[in-house]
Structure formats: C-alpha cells, structure tokens
C-alpha cells in the first residue's frame, strides 16, 4: 500500500507524486521534453505541470532555455531542489507516522486486480 501526499494550493496541486517524479526526470535529463517521454506523458502535459508548480511557488522550480541552434533545455532550480527535498522528507515522515494504520488498512483490502 502506498500513501500519496499532495500539497494543495487553492484549486491547484502545487506538489504531488507525479510532479516530484517529473522534477527528478528534468533534473536527470535537462529537458522537459525528454522527461515527458521518459515518463510516458505528452510534452504539453509535462509543461502544464511545470507551469502549475512555477505559478504556485514564490520562485520558479524549473527554468527553461529556448531552443534553436544552441539547443534548449530545462533545469530544476536550487529552489526547486529544496521544494523537492522538503516534499520527499514530508512524504517519508507521513509514511513513517502512518505505518501501523497503513498496515492495518492493507490487511482489510481485497487482492489488487
């Protein structure tokens, strides 16, 4: 059983498991397009997720460079890395705190299809 934590910001999700995974892929690959491809999502969807994060936080979590003859790219900012680390730490703490309840709930579930 997996506990999923999302940080709601008004009508938006500022951070959640999918956005964290996207940030990790962007950090690794240096490109929103390559990260989207690796995660099996469209570039448009990945860009929307990045844009939502950048709008929700006071500082950008991802900075982009335009394409062209020198190529483009994206990088997770220092602030974005801090957000990602805080989110991962929060998730770990939540999972640890709820370990007993998660185990008990898991025993109550039918087998997954």
Image (spheres, grey):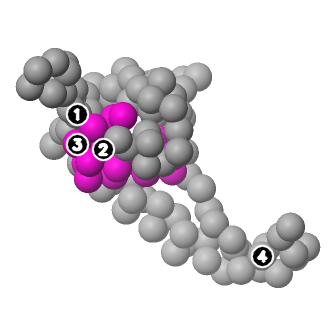
Name the residue carrying label 1: 74
Name the residue carrying label 4: 106
Q: Nearer the viewer, mark 2 or mark 4?
A: 2
Name the residue carrying label 3: 30
Could you tell me which secondary element the residue under label 4 belongs to?
helix
Q: CA distance from mark 3 to mark 1?
A: 5 Å
Residue 56 picture location, percent across and down: 39, 25
Residue that appears at 22% across and 42% down:
30
Name the residue carrying label 2: 26
Callout 3: few (<14), some (14-19), or many (20+) C-alpha neighbours within 10 Å?
A: some
Callout 2: few (<14), some (14-19), or many (20+) C-alpha neighbours within 10 Å?
A: many
Do labels 3 and 1 touch, CB within 8 Å? yes
Question: Earlier along the polypeptide chain: callout 3 or callout 1?
Answer: 3
Q: CA distance from mark 1 to mark 4?
A: 39 Å
Which quadrant of the figure contains the C terminus? Answer: bottom right
Q: Is residue 100 above or below residue 15?
A: below
Q: CA distance from mark 3 to mark 4?
A: 38 Å
Q: CA distance from mark 2 to mark 1?
A: 7 Å
Give left or right: position of 102 versus 74.
Answer: right
Which quadrant of the figure contains the N terminus? Answer: bottom right
Q: Is residue 84 above or below residue 70?
A: below
Do labels 2 and 3 touch, CB within 8 Å? yes
């Amino acid at each position: 059983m997996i506990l999923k934590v999302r940080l709601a910001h008004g009508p938006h999700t500022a951070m959640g498991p999918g956005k964290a995974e996207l940030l990790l892929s962007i950090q690794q690959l240096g490109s929103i397009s390559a990260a989207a491809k690796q995660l099996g999502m469209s570039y448009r969807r990945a860009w929307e997720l990045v844009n939502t994060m950048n709008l929700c936080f006071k500082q950008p979590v991802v900075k982009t460079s335009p394409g062209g003859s020198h190529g483009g790219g994206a990088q997770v900012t220092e602030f974005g890395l801090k957000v990602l680390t805080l989110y991962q730490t929060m998730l770990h703490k939540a999972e640890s705190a709820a370990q007993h309840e998660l185990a008990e709930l898991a025993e109550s579930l039918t087998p997954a299809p």
